[in-house]
Image (spheres, helix red, strand yellow):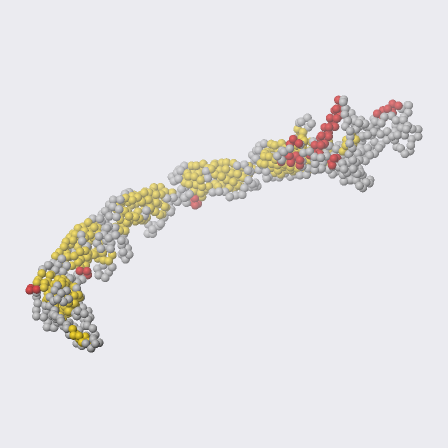
Amino acid sequence: MIRLACDNTQVLKLPLLGIAQKPQIKITRIQFDDGSIIHHEGFQRDEVFDLVLPFGPQNPKAMSTCLFTVKNETLLRLPFKWITFDNPGTSASTTPPATINHPPESLLIDPPTGHLPPSTETIFEIRFTPQLIKIYDLLSRLSLLPDRPQSPSLRSPSPTPTITPITIRSTGHGIPYDLTVRPTLLAVPKTLSTGKPYTTTLTLTNHSVSRVAYDWALSNIDSRILDVSLSSTSGTIEPNSSISLELELVGGFPGRLEGALMCYTAHDLGPVLRVPVDAVVELVEGSIGFVEEIVDFGLIRLGGAKRCKVGLRSDAGLPVRWEVGWAKRGKEGGKDVKDGFVVCEPSEGILNPGERTDIVVEFIPLWYQSFRGILDCRISYLQPPTTVSSRSATPDSKITDLTNNELDETDPPIPSILAAAIELRAEVQTPSVRLLNPTNYVQAYITVPFKYTLTLQNNTLLPAEFKFLPIKMPGVQVTFTPETGTIPGGQDIDIRVQVLLTRLSDEDIHIPLNCHIEGMVPKNGLITADLQISVKAIDVTFRILSTTPDGTRTVTSPKTRISSASAPNGPKQRFDFGNECPIFANVTRTLVVRNLSAVEAPWRVWVEKFAATALEEEEDGDGAGAGAGVEVGGGRLKKSTSRASDLSGNILSENVSDDNPPLLPPTTVAKIGFTSQAGQEYINNIKGVRKLIQKMHLLLREGKGAAFHATPSHGTIPPWSEIHISLTSYNNLVGIFEDTFVCEIGEWIREIIPIRLGVVGLPVKFSGAQLVASRKDSPGGMDRVNFGTRILLPKPSPSLTIPQTPNHEPHSKVIHLENQTPRDILLQWKIFLHHVPISTSSSSTTTSTSRTPPTPPDLHTWLLPSTRRPPVPSPAVSPPPRIHLPPPPRPLPPGT
């Protein structure tokens, strides 16, 4: 009853009613692994335990299970918990120890905790798994727990007792696994060939009380030597039963094998079964070998190489990795002398069954020999597919899966064996070439190439490659045709040699012609021909011709022969234009140069002082304005302004004295004309002379008074020929001119020829209407001025030196003086009177005398330069036929 006190002093009483029921729980049935069911009436029990489960013998880690059903017969939901512990040993005591630190793992009930629904059955699974080999006696108690925890205010001071309605006893015995395998020793009855299988059966029997798992592995069996295949490498076997496994052994890499098949059972808890394996694997004879029986390289030149193709086949039935090598057969003094190399491409690889690969074998000799060697093929390993896992015999070792044909890094090196061999042969020789004409003596001209032939003879059957080495000598150029090539075995070849010499030598030139023979051993393959050459220089002769007025040429100097090998002692030629060359006249001399050798050489000529610059400019120019020039001696001259017009403004000098006479101004002369034939000829003669003088002024515009021009001035003289060089002189001043003519032929000859020209004549021309010209038919005639007959006065005036007219007026005549030179002329007039007495008795004499008046012995006209030099005295001469300047006693400066 619950009493409830209110604030109005009233007390309410509430009665409480409930039903208390004792828990009633029991096991109704049990179901074992084999499907058998036992109900409550058939349970094995005793006075203490509600249920006794004898599991009997059991292998470690093997699990035995059973299902039992528990029914809650009350109307309450009961919380529970299973507690398992070892049996203390007293059957009357079912109290568990005070503390359970480690509940036993050998017995488990599922679920271990939960609630039992009211009036409902609950199925539990009990699993017995012995961990060790021993006897097990375990108790499992179902304990009911309070439905909810009590509050601290209502909690009784004494603890609530635990209710244990069910106690189960489980017993069992942990025993070891028991398995056997037959046969216990696996011995291959005969030699196992590579790629050949051997099949047998393994029988595995389980004598244990539980199902056992197994796993096969290899121990000390190299899968490269023996391939092991099982129909089942892992699985389970029922208790007291056996299974048969098909075992196949396939020979791989040749060798002897002593290993074992390891069977690991019950996840390393059961016994390890070992089946020893003893087998010998050999390669089938001829299964791997070369297609050819011998490799014969034949004849090889030392320094060369030769290749042959060799086929390698495989009938081994399995893929193989191969590698080829070589060795020389026979040793000198017990030592392996490496006098050659054998290179194989490829040298290694993988060859599948039934395939063939071609190997290119190249032999490179180092010395001439009869080579004998062996080419061998070694197999490093075979690579068959593997289906059995492999691990070491110790359980803690690492397991390596070889199903993908991958080897572990810790595996030993792959051994190799000799599978096939083939013989190598070669005959190595060195080329031998000789010159049939090693010594040669020739004569050659400088700069003229000459050719001759060398013969190379091959003394062996090998083709010999030759190459002529370049010649490095100053002034020597040698070319070979062909320069390089190949001489067939046992044959000859002709080499055309061309030599060009560009320098002279007093002694013979020795030229070594070196030829290198590729691969020839003697003298390192060098053969030499000695070429001795006597060099001949250019040889020329000089000869000077003069041109006569009728156009013919005459020899004016002896022939001079000059060679470039030796210079002449002195000049033997001379351009002598004479000492009486008329002023304004052209004179030509011809130089003939004859080449007496086979040398073709360039030449050029020039004069050093008096060069015709205007003609040279016209020759060097492009010919522009040619129509505006004046023809002079085959050239064209440009027009120039005359000196008279340039000096028209300078009439007199400021300082006039005897030492510095005045410069006369030009006079404008009226043109005169004649209608008669003789007059016309006279006018034409004057025009021709003036035109010639104008040409000279244009040509000699430098004012030197003379010039020399050579035509042609340069060119090339061919072999065995001659050239003609014309040298023309031009002048417009009186005097003696000396110059030097230079002729260069190539780089070897320089001929210097002196030039001498003497110019004479009167550079002043008298003209006028009152001047009587001399007759052409009288060479000794003289131009004159006729005054006629004049009457003298009885008493002449003492102040006059000429007769007077009766009216005392002088009689005058006008003449013109023309300076035809480019320089000023100093005139000095002297008058000479020749009186002839007039008498009746000597009238004939007077008439004769007046017709040809005598010439004064000292009547001269001096031509002096503009520098106002004093005249040079001249010795007395006889009366000349014409007035001219006689040659001075010593050479005067040009223009004097």
Quarter the N terminus occupies: bottom left
Side (left or right) of 426 relative to 530:
left
Residue appearing at x 73%, y 28% in the figure: 687
Locate residue 248, reporting x and y percent. Answer: 18, 51
| Farthest front residue in view | 8
Q: Nearer the viewer, residue 688 or 300?
A: 688
Q: Is residue 292 left or right of residue 269?
A: right
Residue at (79% x, 28% y) in the render: 768
| Residue 893 image-quadrant placement | top right
Assign the C terminus to one quadrant of the image.
Answer: top right
Residue at image point 15% right, 62% down:
63
Residue 754 locus on image (x, y percent)? 68, 37
Viewer-nearest residue: 57 or 295: 57
Specify whether residue 132 is in view: no
Q: Percent from the top left, x then y, of residue 791?
A: 90, 26
Residue at the image point whose x is 75% and y is 33% from the top = 820
Q: Is residue 662 above or below residue 108?
A: above
In this figure, what is the number of numbered marks?
0
Task: Determine which quarter of the picture holds residue 433.
Answer: top left
Q: Nearer the viewer, residue 516 or 583?
A: 583
Q: Residue furthest right?
A: 794
Residue most extreme to the top: 676
Along the line of sight, which residue is nearer the eye, 153 or 299? 153
- Residue 623 in sight: yes
Image: 577 above or below 75: above
Residue 825 in the image: state x and y as whole percent.
77, 36
